[in-house]
Image: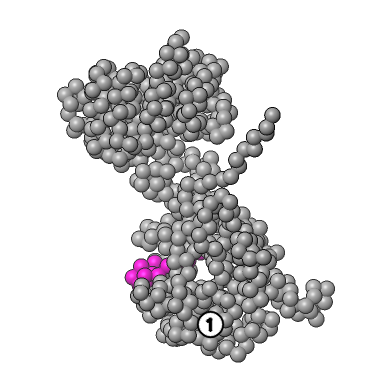
């Protein structure tokens, strides 16, 4: 008697929204190429169960001020260019960045307190020097971001950038300028799936289409709550695929910022001899963190170290069966 | 939760008159109101107003002209059911209903299969409505098996354990809850489980309260469909809250708004 093997493949009723970032001259922008994420109808890399039309992408970080607190290991690949966001962005593209994530750290009133006009200059400089699409990330001070983004969003009108972030407490200005100037938005929540949903509802209520949002559920480095974020991302993705229209957005993970803030990546060998060479350890910590988030459903990874980026992109290709 | 709007039923005087006089007005008005309130299906029942299949055909067409909502064709006469099913414009539909009575199973189940419709199976038989859990389960299982044999997949089968008025048969509600739990074990995935919800509050004073309290208890037991008064806002809010508590929907502070949004777009 033959044994019937049951078909245990999962199928889901809803695809994750497809989000395109950037615009070529044909579409009113100046980008040489656009980046599209989302559209998947299956869990991460489950190509045997559904479609993964747009594999995850890697954005590399550029700041409008030098990355003073970046440890040497991750500063060195950019040591020549950290004073110029444009040259810095070019380096990132050489290192394989699919997008540039320009972080307006210098606008922070508790830091360099650069003006909105300065921010516009930095953004324009990056646009001039590279052809990849842009993520533009505010300094995180709500009042200042609300001053900076109206000018920045207007300056990059037509470029279809991904701007962020909106939060439960600060979304109206960014929603208004993203709507006015045709950009996408990053919806941030503090490792809290209920707030993640609520931010999306608030954006929707303010008239912003759900299909133009990317979820940023907050990120923890390997060893720093990664499993908690993982479970939230997994549940978010299962809900989205399962039909929850408020949770069916692509997900962004801010890897570099978190990883290069923890001692396991930063500490030099002299301080932690048993941990080995930080030149290997740091990028490995960043890449490993990235792998975990890819498994959890990340669509956009924001990263820093060229070696970690290279390894992560190779990993994506390999797991999709396109290489080695 | 699958909500089937109960209002287009000749048991209501305005609908009975409209059917007799072939006046589409009140029928289409109730179709629009219930669809706007979030009904997933509209029950369409000519009841005692007519035995003529042509009247069911007319009624289904009138409702279809008003709204795109799927229709639950409701009659105990196979020829009337078939007239309604044949009039459908290709939208999803439910046959309401068969019983576990052999004669019904043989005449009505094939209709659902023929028209690719879902079917509600009411757990009564030739002896009438069961008063205990066992016969509810026995009849439900019999209907389920007959439907599967006819090629109807579990996700299109709705079992109804028969709700009785609390005012007259107070011991029955708890038995219905137990039967619902048993139904969830029939298959994996289980069939849908539905009740005629408004039966529970017949001739009572606190109709809305009794109805929604029973509904959330039944949802906890496994109920996932109901023929009900979708115009009752408190009832729908209770369903939204129950879906959160049962972890079927991710909580957000504006979960009632999410519910309304989903419903306004025609449900899941």
B197 or A6, nearer to the observer: A6
| Segment colored magenta | A175-188
Residue placed at 48% from the left, 69% from the top?
A35
Residue B201, image x, y percentages: 39, 24
Residue placed at 37% from the left, 21% from the top?
B202
Figure check: A141 above or below A122? above
- In the picture provided, is A285 more to the left or to the right than A80? right
- In the picture provided, is B72 more to the left or to the right than B172? left
Location of residue B99 by image quarter: top left
Q: Is residue A184 magenta?
A: yes
Residue placed at 49% from the left, 14% from the top?
B130
Count of numbered tags: 1
Q: Circle 1 is placed at which residue position?
A: A89
Quadrant that contains the N terminus of chain A: top right
Q: Is residue A282 visible?
A: yes
- In the picture provided, is A126 more to the left or to the right than A150? right
Quick one: which residue is furthest to the right in this view? A274
Residue placed at 53% from the left, 82% from the top?
A89
* Neighbourhood count class around disc 1 (C-alpha, 10 Å): few under 14, some 14–19, many 20 upward: many
Q: Chain of mark 1?
A: A
Location of residue B238 by image quarter: top left
Figure check: A53 above or below B165? below
Q: Is residue B229 visible?
A: no
B124 or A119, nearer to the observer: B124
Residue A30, image x, y percentages: 40, 79
């Amino acid at each position: 008697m033959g044994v019937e093997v049951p078909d245990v493949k999962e199928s889901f009723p809803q695809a994750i929204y497809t989000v395109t970032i950037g615009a070529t001259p044909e579409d009113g922008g100046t980008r040489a190429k656009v980046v599209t994420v989302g559209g998947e109808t299956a869990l991460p890399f489950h190509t045997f169960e559904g479609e993964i039309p747009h594999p995850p992408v890697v954005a590399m970080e550029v700041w409008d001020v030098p990355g003073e607190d970046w440890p040497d290991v991750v500063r060195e690949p950019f040591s020549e260019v950290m004073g110029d966001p444009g040259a810095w962005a070019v380096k990132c593209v050489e290192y394989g960045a699919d997008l540039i994530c320009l972080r307006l750290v210098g606008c922070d009133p508790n830091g360099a307190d650069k003006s909105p006009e300065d921010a516009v200059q930095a953004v324009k400089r990056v646009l001039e020097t590279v052809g990849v699409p842009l993520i533009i990330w505010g300094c995180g001070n709500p009042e200042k971001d609300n001053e900076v983004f109206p000018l920045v969003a207007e300056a990059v009108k037509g470029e279809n950038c991904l701007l962020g972030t909106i939060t439960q407490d600060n979304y109206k200005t960014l929603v208004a300028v993203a709507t006015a100037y045709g950009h996408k938005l990053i919806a941030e929540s503090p490792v809290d799936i209920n707030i993640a949903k609520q931010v999306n509802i608030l954006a929707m209520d303010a008239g912003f289409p759900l299909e133009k949002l990317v979820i940023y559920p907050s990120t923890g480095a390997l060893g720093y709550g990664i499993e908690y974020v993982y479970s939230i991302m997994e549940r978010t993705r299962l809900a989205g695929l399962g039909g929850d229209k408020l949770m069916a957005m692509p997900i962004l993970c801010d890897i570099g910022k978190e990883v290069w803030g923890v001692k396991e990546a930063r500490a030099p060998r002299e301080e932690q001899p048993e941990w080995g060479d930080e030149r290997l350890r740091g990028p490995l910590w960043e890449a490993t963190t990235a792998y975990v988030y890819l498994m959890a459903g990340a669509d956009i990874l924001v990263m820093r170290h060229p070696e970690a980026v290279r390894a992560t992109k190779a990993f994506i290709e390999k797991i999709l069966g396109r290489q080695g | 939760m699958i909500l089937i709007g109960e209002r287009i039923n000749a048991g209501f005087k305005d609908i009975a008159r409209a059917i007799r006089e072939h006046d589409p007005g009140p029928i289409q008005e109730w179709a629009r109101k219930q669809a706007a309130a979030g009904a997933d299906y509209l029950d369409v029942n000519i009841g005692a107003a007519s035995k003529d299949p042509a009247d069911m055909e007319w009624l289904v067409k009138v409702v279809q002209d008003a709204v795109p909502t799927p229709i639950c064709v409701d009659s105990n006469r196979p020829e009337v059911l078939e007239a309604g099913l044949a009039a459908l414009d290709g939208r999803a539909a439910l046959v309401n209903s068969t019983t576990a009575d052999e004669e019904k199973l043989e005449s009505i189940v094939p209709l659902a299969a023929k028209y690719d419709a879902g079917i509600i199976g009411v757990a009564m038989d030739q002896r009438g409505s069961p008063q205990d859990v066992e016969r509810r389960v026995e009849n439900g299982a019999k209907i389920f098996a007959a439907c599967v044999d006819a090629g109807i997949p579990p996700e299109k089968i709705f079992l109804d354990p028969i709700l009785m008025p609390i005012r007259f048969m107070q011991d029955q509600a708890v038995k219905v809850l137990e039967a619902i739990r048993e139904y969830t074990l029939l298959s994996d995935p289980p069939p849908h489980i539905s009740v005629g919800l408004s039966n529970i509050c017949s001739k009572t004073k606190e109709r809305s309260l009794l109805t929604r309290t029973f509904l959330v208890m039944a949802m906890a037991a496994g109920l996932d469909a109901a023929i009900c008064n979708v115009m009752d806002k408190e009832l729908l809010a209770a369903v939204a809250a129950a879906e959160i508590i049962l972890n079927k929907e991710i909580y957000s502070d504006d979960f009632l708004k999410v519910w309304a949004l989903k419903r306004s777009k025609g449900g899941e």
